[in-house]
Amino acid sequence: MFDLTTRDIKYLSGVGPQRAAVLNKEANICSLHDLLYYFPYKYVDRSRIYLIREISGSMPYIQLKGEIRSFEDVGEGRQRRLIAHFMDGTGVVDLVWFNGIKYILGKYKLHQEYVVFGKPTLFNGRFQVAHPDIDLAEDVQLSSMGLRPYYNTTERMKRIGLNSHALEKMMGIVLQQLREPLPETLSPSILQAHHLMPLNEALANIHFPTGAEALRKAQYRLKFEELFYVQLNILRYARDRQQKYRGYVFSRVGEVFNTFYSQNLPFELTNAQKRVLKEIRRDMGSGRQMNRLLQGDVGSGKTLVALMSMLIALDNHYQACMMAPTEILANQHYETICGFLHDMDIRVELLTGSVKGKRREKILAGLQAGDVQILIGTHAVIEETVSFASLGFVVIDEQHRFGVEQRARLWTKSMQPPHVLVMTATPIPRTLAMTLYGDLDVSVIDELPPGRKPIATIHQFDNRRESLYGSVRKQIAEGRQVYIVYPLIKESEKIDLKNLEEGYLHVCEAFPDCIVCKVHGKMKAAEKDAQMQLFISGKAQIMVATTVIEVGVNVPNASVMIIENAERFGLSQLHQLRGRVGRGAEQSYCILVTGYKLSEDTRKRLEIMVRTNDGFEIAEADLKLRGPGDLEGTQQSGVAFDLKIADIAKDGQLLQYVREVAQKVVETDPDGTLPENEILWRQLKVLRKTNVNWAAIS
Ligand code: ADP
Ligand code: MG
């Protein structure tokens, strides 16, 4: 069969080994197949030629036809540029190049008719077009041009002549050379049922649309297919796993759970907590292994749900384990849970990197003997030396800090994979959750415990600091505590730390009567804990910190969160930080401090924060503003977003639709044997082999 994936790009006419190497490196194009699936990012209507006289203020990309009357090489060094005076009998525009001057001078001739394409801008009273596309007029056939594709290229590609135009030509050659049609990658029944354009037609039209409608259909078909296979892959994995692994059956809810419920539970559960507990109990009793994602905004009470689920495991004589991403957080969980379980005869232990020597040995022995019923810890719990007598249930808090591999290692800790509950306070929009965690069931706590006042969020410019500190003093006088957070971005850790230290000194000066503590990621664990403890115990009124406090820390008496350089944080990070306050009964405040100069995007982010406290709304907005690639949690989640044409942020509806189509295929053809689906299963196999990321979904 004619297989484009095995045809190296270097053999395409005009490419060769050197350009092929750049294409590999810069655009991940290795084969003719890769090239064909390198889709344009936009199309421009080139069916019309404008007169220079017609050019006006703000025009999009346009075409002109005329001659170059003279070249002018002006300026020196970095200012140097080449200007070509281009005329068509109705006026003059300047074509301008800032680099590649020698090449341009050699390539274009005077008194030769060209078609020039670019975006005119007004400069010193004259229109100019920078780095235009130029074709010999006689080569341009207007009727055939219509919508023209534009491809992303990098500087390195452009330097060796691989601009959008060159790619366009290469596409043309490949499509022309396709003597046989490519094999269809969707089944006839799916093509028919959903009115999809056949593959060959779609590929031809995505590069060289015969019209707007054909382009729309081609895009729809290719997006459909892309999302369909992502979903088919996930659903198929989920099914395979269900068949392969039985789950422990936790049939009873017994003494431990009931004692806790009737004697220790200090408050009424919210309806959302009750609902989620019911979902978890149902899973645990079903005979299949639970894989559940629990989403709930900061402060919604996930820890309690996790604890009560652990008690069900205990009632069925299994051990439970909870893994947190940082030591501070593991400590806090340990204390919270011991507090909740007071007077109950349950052995809970804490295992982190700093638990060593005799104490560690005792815990490890207790785990092996089955005496330790609940283990709480950091990554330390998945080290090889840790083994359980009967691990039945695992909770992973703040899941995005853990990689897929780490999750998988937990499974090796018991005969059968334990039930798994993954908790996250970074709400993931539905569409994204479906692609990322399509094999997990999702529970949502969409209700905060009663009595919480919404946090008031205020945006303040940094020159108003004195009045801001005035309000902070009032809060402190009333007995409240305050966080002041500085950004910490890896690449400039040193500068950030300097900001933090300076900020710390400044705060100490501004609040001479207060005890100010300080926490950042570069501190030794013991030192960090000591500082945290100062704040948790209420001895310190102010904590100056980097984002290490982002996750999970719970100090209900803290009512003010000041975020310095708020423009440097992403939306979900801001929301997480804000969640540190508003945990008590008092009115809480979040102050976003920025400089005056803000980009459009930043302004939007701050507006959203001021407007809403709803984590899901914020997550959706974040997805729209930043795109899924940047969304927190997606990088480490095991699914990189190398979608070529679909856009999770924009194609949510299609994703939903396509998921149902894939679901039906898996349901009606559970063993993958129906002849009508043969194409689908074969294609899925190909994709799993070629797409490394897909194999990693656990
Ligand atoms: P998160 O979902 O962010 O992990 P936590 O589990 O830390 O939230 O809960 C936040 C606070 O709310 C804790 O102090 C917890 O004890 C309290 N809490 C949890 N559930 C309830 C409830 N149903 N009613 C009142 N307070 C609750
Ligand atoms: Mg939590």
Image (cartoon, rainbow, N blue to C red):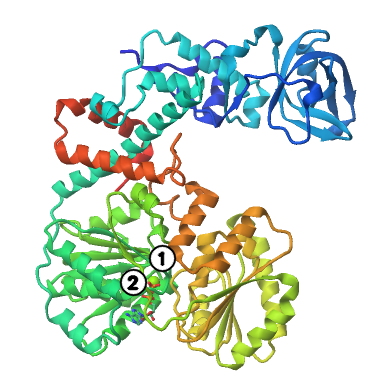
Q: CA distance from mark 1 to mark 2?
A: 9 Å
* The quarter of the displayed image where residue 106 is located: top right
Residue designated by label 2:
302
| Residue 16, x across and y down, in percent | 55, 14
Q: Classify the position of ligand 1 by quadrant: top left, top right, bottom left or bottom right.
A: bottom left
Number of marks drawn: 2
Secondary structure beneath dot 1 equals loop
Label 1 CB-ligand 1 distance < 8 A: yes
Specify whether residue 54 is in view. Answer: yes
Discs 1, 2 touching: Cβ within 8 Å: yes
Residue found farthest to the front: 54
Specify whether tag 2 is near ligand 1 (CB below 8 Å). yes
Q: Kindly identify the amino acid type of the residue bearing the numbered disc 1.
A: Ala
Residue 153: percent from left, percent from top = 60, 29
User: Is 348 placed left or right of 492 in the picture?
Assistant: left
| Nearer-the-camera pick, 67 or 167 | 67
Report whether 464 appears left or right of 526.
right
Residue that badge 1 annotates: 425
